[in-house]
């Protein structure tokens, strides 16, 4: 896999608790057009605008998040991702990003197809359910709670919990290529035994270019 430079101190300070933002930013070139799905308060788009001079839109269904995006000066559209991305033309963005949202979506296959239709490439991040601390909590008889999975079992929005190995098997079956991957724990990059030692994964995807296999 491609190596990344260490995150800058200034970026670490600007994004407490969101090390995946830094990994995403290193894949986005200056001036890129970006669509951020499930954008929350628009923090990622604002960061990409400041760090990479990126332009684009966020999409979110929440009234509160839409209002927060407007307050943050981020272009935002209110829409339900489960309904698809039919309002966007094919190839209308350089990158379509789904950051820590995939596990909360019902229609996973359809959404990933739409991401790679609308964007030249897709970037997806998610919490790794194979992380050793998650496994330890399951062995102790409890549903896991962590920084990446902060909800209790009874109030979680997450409906599909999966590991790095699960995700890579899934995308191969969908004809999607993994172009690059970053695996993180507590903001640090993990290279050895990522499916066991990694808490959060960030993938760069497309449908057209061959990519070297990655080990989990």
Image (cartoon, rainbow, N blue to C red):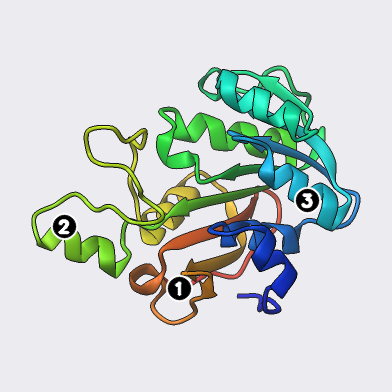
Residue at point 56% right, 38% down?
Answer: 112
> x, y (%) of residue 46?
76, 44
Q: Give the quarter of the image for residue 185.
A: bottom left
Q: Is residue 128 left or right of residue 87?
A: left
Q: Are marks 2 and 1 in contact (CB under 8 Å)?
A: no
Circle 3 Cα neighbour tier, 10 Å, few/some/many (<14 / 14–19 / ≥20):
many
Residue designated by label 3: 48
Residue designated by label 1: 215
Residue designated by label 2: 138
Q: Give the quarter of the image for residue 51.
A: bottom right
Say which label, 1 or 3, has the lower sequence index: 3
Q: CA distance from mark 2 to mark 1?
A: 24 Å
The answer to whether residue 135 is visible is yes
In this picture, is 19 found above or below 50?
below
**SS class, disc 1:** loop
- Which of 147 and 83 lies nearest the eye of the viewer? 147
Say which label, 2 or 1, has the lower sequence index: 2
Q: CA distance from mark 3 to mark 2?
A: 36 Å
Q: Which mark is residue 77?
A: none
Q: Indicate which label's residue lies in the foreground, 1 or 3.
A: 3
> Which residue occupies the extreme bottom position in the image?
192
> x, y (%) of residue 36?
68, 38
Q: Indicate which label's residue lies in the foreground, 2 or 1.
A: 2
Residue at point 71% right, 21% down?
Answer: 77
- Which of 196 and 64 lies nearest the eye of the viewer? 64
**SS class, disc 3:** helix
Residue at point 65% right, 63% down?
Answer: 23
The answer to whether residue 61 is visible is no
Say which label, 3 or 2, has the lower sequence index: 3
């Amino acid at each position: 896999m491609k190596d990344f430079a260490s995150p800058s101190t200034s970026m670490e300070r600007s994004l407490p608790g969101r090390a995946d933002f830094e990994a995403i930013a290193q894949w986005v070139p200056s001036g890129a057009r970006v669509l951020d799905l499930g954008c929350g308060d628009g923090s990622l788009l604002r960061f990409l605008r400041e760090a990479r001079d990126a332009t684009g839109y966020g999409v979110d269904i929440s009234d509160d998040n839409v209002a927060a995006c407007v307050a943050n000066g981020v272009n935002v559209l209110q829409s339900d991702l489960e309904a698809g991305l039919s309002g966007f033309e094919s190839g209308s963005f350089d990158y379509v990003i789904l950051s820590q949202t995939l596990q909360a979506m019902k229609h996973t296959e359809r959404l990933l197809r739409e991401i790679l239709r609308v964007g030249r490439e897709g970037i997806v991040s998610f919490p790794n359910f194979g992380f050793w601390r998650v496994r330890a909590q399951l062995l102790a008889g409890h549903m896991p709670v962590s920084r990446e999975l902060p909800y209790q079992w009874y109030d979680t929005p997450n409906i599909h919990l999966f590991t790095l190995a699960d995700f890579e098997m899934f995308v191969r079956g969908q004809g999607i290529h993994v172009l690059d991957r970053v695996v993180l724990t507590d903001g640090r990059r993990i290279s050895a035994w990522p499916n066991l030692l990694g808490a959060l994964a960030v993938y760069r995807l497309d449908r057209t270019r061959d990519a070297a296999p990655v080990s989990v």
